[in-house]
C-alpha cells in the first residue's frame, strides 16, 4: 500500500482528522516565497509541519503563526541524538543523555515532536533521519529551495508516493517534481491533494 492509499484507509471513520502540510527547504537560507507560503497554509486552515529549525523552516512558521485567521498549529519534528543508543536498546546503564542541535526548535514551533533521530543532509534518507516522519506525516508537501536535506526529503516523498510540489526560486526542481510558479498554483495543488487524502 502506498502512502496515499494508507492515508485514505486511516482516514476512513476518523472524526475531525487534521490536515497537515509539510514545508521543506533550506535550514540556513530564507527563500522570498516563505512568508507568503506560510500565510497561505494558515489561511487554508491546515496545520504546518517543518523540521523545526532555522532558515525556511523558521520563516514559514513565523508567517503561519502570525496569520490572524489561522486554525492550524505549527508542528516541528526535531532531530536529536541519544548518547549510547546501543546501551539504551540493550537496556543497560541508567543515565541516557539526549542532545538537541543548536537552533532547534525555532521559537515559532507550537508542538515540538522530539526524536532520537540525528541524521540529515546527505544522510537524510537513512532510517536514523526524521525526514521519514516529516514525509509520512504530511498530507501534502511543498518544497522550497534547499540543500542535501531537502533533496533527500523530496526523494523520500517520491518513493513513498506523497503529494509534493516545488515552489520558490528553484533553478530546477529536484527529482523532476512539478513546479508551482505562483501561490495560486500552490493553493490549487494543496486543495486537490488534501481533498483526496
Image (cartoon, rainbow, N blue to C red):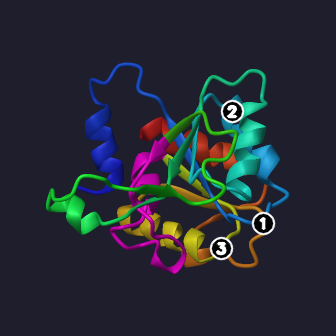
Distance of mark 1 from mark 3, alpha carbons? Answer: 17 Å
Q: Is residue 192 above or below residue 173?
A: above
> First in sequence: mark 1 or mark 2?
1
Q: Position of residue 94 (x, y in %)?
A: 24, 52
Q: Is residue 184 visible?
A: no
Q: Residues within 10 Å of mark 3 (few under 14, many from 20)?
A: some
For this orientation, the residue located farthest to the right is 32
Q: Which mark is residue 29?
A: 1
Is residue 165 shown left or right of residue 184? left
Question: Does the magenta segment cover residue 107?
Answer: no
The C terminus lies in which quarter of the figure? top left
Relative to 22, residue 132 above or below = below
Quadrant of the image occupied by residue 92: bottom left
Name which residue lies at 45% across and 47% down.
Answer: 114
Most foreground residue, 156 or 108: 108
Viewer can see residue 72? yes
**Residue assigned mark 2:** 42
For the record, the magenta segment spans 113-139
The residue that appears at 77% across and 62% down in the rendered structure is 168
Q: Residue at x 37, y 64 (%)?
A: 83
Q: CA distance from mark 2 to mark 3?
A: 24 Å
Q: CA distance from mark 1 to mark 2?
A: 22 Å
Q: Which residue is mark 3?
A: 173
Looking at the rendered image, the disc whose residue lies closer to the viewer, 1 or 2, is: 1
- Classify mark 2: residues with Cα within 10 Å, few (<14), some (14-19) or many (20+): many
Magenta highlight on residue 123 = yes
Quarter of the rendering occupied by the N terminus: bottom left
Disc number lying in front (2 or 3)? 2
Amino acid at each position: 500500500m502506498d502512502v496515499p492509499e494508507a492515508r485514505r484507509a486511516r482516514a476512513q471513520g476518523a472524526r475531525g482528522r487534521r490536515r497537515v502540510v509539510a514545508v521543506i527547504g533550506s535550514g540556513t537560507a530564507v527563500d522570498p516565497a516563505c512568508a507568503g507560503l506560510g500565510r497561505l497554509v494558515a489561511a487554508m486552515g491546515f496545520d504546518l509541519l517543518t523540521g523545526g529549525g532555522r532558515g525556511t523552516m523558521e520563516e514559514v512558521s513565523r508567517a503561519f503563526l502570525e496569520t490572524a485567521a489561522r486554525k492550524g498549529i505549527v508542528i516541528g519534528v526535531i532531530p536529536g541524538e541519544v548518547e549510547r543508543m546501543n546501551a539504551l536498546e540493550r537496556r543497560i546503564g541508567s543515565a541516557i543523555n539526549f542532545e538537541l542541535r543548536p537552533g532547534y526548535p525555532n521559537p515559532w514551533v507550537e508542538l515540538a515532536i522530539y526524536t532520537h533521530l540525528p541524521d540529515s543532509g546527505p544522510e537524510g534518507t537513512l532510517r536514523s533521519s526524521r525526514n521519514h516522519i516529516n514525509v509520512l506525516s504530511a498530507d501534502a508537501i511543498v518544497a522550497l529551495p534547499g540543500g542535501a536535506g531537502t533533496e533527500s526529503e523530496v526523494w523520500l516523498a517520491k518513493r513513498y508516493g506523497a503529494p509534493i510540489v516545488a515552489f520558490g526560486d528553484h533553478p530546477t526542481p529536484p527529482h523532476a517534481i512539478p513546479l508551482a510558479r505562483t501561490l495560486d498554483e500552490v493553493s490549487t495543488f494543496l486543495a486537490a491533494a488534501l481533498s483526496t487524502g
